[in-house]
Amino acid sequence: MTKMLEGLKTIYSGNNIVNKQIQLFSLCGIAAILGGYLSLAAQGINEIKPFDKAAIVLCQIVWILFFTGYETIYIHRKSLPELDMSSFKIALKRIPLIIFFVFTGLALISTYFTPYQYFALSLEIILGVPLTMLQAGYALNYNANDYKKYFQKFRVKEYFYLLIKRIWVIFCAYLTAFMTTFLIFFIIGIIFAIVTIAKGSDLASMIMLITSNQTVLTKLSTYVSNILLVYFLSVGVLAWDYELIKTYESEE
């Protein structure tokens, strides 16, 4: 856990960190809004045409490609990188590209093939450790011949240790995102209730107003929770990457 906390420090400290965090949050927000729109369409709340759905899926794939390169640069520098085209350039190299194809395939299966959803998610978590080892080895010097550097140190004990940490990161990201969303809307609700009562309206009128705007509230809560979830997952994955690197560097 100490190594992961050190990883969080590298994400929230350094030169130009405020701008980098705004960039990362904006990047996560774009992906989350696209995912939220598809989620609402699946619930029948939004209407979506096949062409629009295909365009959104394509944008999501491009986002995963970009984040693969972004993550690789972070592993190399051990600090949060700027958002620029270098992330795409790194992601298109052989080792990161292989990792991108594996994770993208599993993500698409878990999202659009419901019967295999849990299998794909489980496989994604299980493969996350060895694939990140390969990615970290490549990221060391951006040399394809170094991709085995960390993988050659593979031990069952460390694997399960890192696997549990990866599951813990995912759990914490979901919990934090949904709890934060709940608190945001709870506080807004309290403020709204106070203002309504101050204006002399009764409780029944307030409940009717909320009920009549249920669809709007559902959309807002979906988008907010998705944005927070993607952001917290991204930060958690980067901190977990740092944990993996430091775990195997300590053996040298």
Image (cartoon, grey):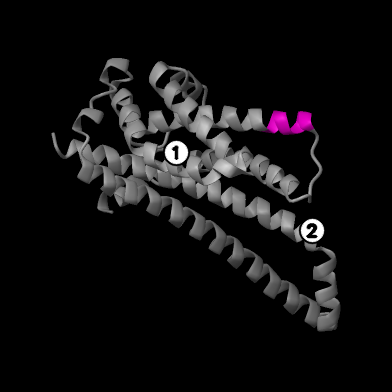
Specify the principal SS of the magenta part.
helix
Point out which mark residue 16 bears.
1
Residue 55 in magenta? yes
Q: Residue at x 67, y 40 (%)?
A: 34
Given residues 29 and 12, the one toward you in this image is 29
Q: Residue at x 59, y 43 (%)?
A: 115
Q: Is residue 109 left or right of residue 152?
A: right
Q: Residue at x 36, y 31 (%)?
A: 131
Label 1 crowding class (10 Å Cα cut-off): few <14, some 14-19, many 20+?
A: few
Residue 197 placed where, x, y %?
79, 82
Label 2 crowding class (10 Å Cα cut-off): few <14, some 14-19, many 20+?
A: few
Vertical side of 101 occupied by 252: above or below: below
Label 1 element class: loop
Read off the magenta span: 50-56
Q: Which circle, 2 or 1, is nearer the viewer? A: 2
Q: Amino acid at mark 2?
A: Thr
Residue 55 placed where, x, y %?
71, 29
Q: Amino acid at mark 1?
A: Asn
Residue 244: quadrant of the picture: top left
Residue 141 placed where, x, y %?
29, 21
Point out which mark residue 215 bears.
2
Q: Is residue 136 in view from this perspective?
A: yes
Q: How far separated are the C-alphas under marks 2 and 1?
A: 39 Å
Residue 147 placed where, x, y %?
29, 22
Quadrant location, the N terminus: bottom left
